Amino acid sequence: EDFDVDHFVSDCRKRVQLEALRDDLELYYKLKTAMVELINKDYAGFVNLSTNLINVPCSGLVGWEDPEESGGEGGGRGNRDGEYV
């Protein structure tokens, strides 16, 4: 599926002011750029992160449920404010 920026802005414009959309997109870009810089800074550590987390139960992670305990697939999803839902 191709991303259509005109459709995206048109759709968002119905629900949010353009200034707020711009601010959110700027924040997203800054966070994405910072994340890429951090990954590139310690790429080996980032790759090893998944290896180090294999033996950590999901319940040991803040905001995540253990799939075996919840009866579902587990995994929380953060909302816009960083709170887990």
Image: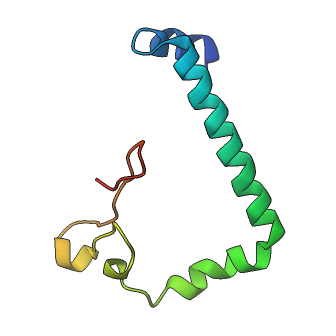
The colour mode here is: rainbow
Is 49 located above or below residue 35 in the figure? below
Query: Does residue 3 appear anywhere in the picture?
Result: no
- Which quadrant is the N terminus positioned in? top right
* Front one among 56 and 21: 21
Does residue 13 appear left or right of residue 85 in this picture? right
Q: Where in the figure is residue 76, as x and y percent of width and height? A: 33, 60
Q: Where in the figure is residue 34, as x and y percent of width and height? A: 73, 52
Q: Where in the figure is residue 20, as x and y percent of width and height? A: 53, 21
Does residue 78 appear left or right of residue 70 in this picture? right
**Outermost residue to the bottom:** 55
Query: Does residue 15 appear anywhere in the picture?
Result: yes
Picture residue at 38% right of the left edge, 46% below the top: 79
Asked where in the image residue 63 lies, by quadrant, the reply is bottom left
Q: Where in the figure is residue 60, as x and y percent of width and height? A: 36, 82
Q: What number of labels is visible?
A: 0
Asked where in the image residue 47 lies, by quadrant, the reply is bottom right
Does residue 77 appear left or right of residue 49 in this picture? left
Does residue 20 appear left or right of residue 67 in this picture? right
Picture residue at 47% right of the left edge, 16% below the top: 12
Picture residue at 67% right of the left edge, 82% below the top: 48
* Front one among 83 and 11: 83
Is 26 located above or below residue 78 in the figure? above
Picture residue at 18% right of the left edge, 71% below the top: 70
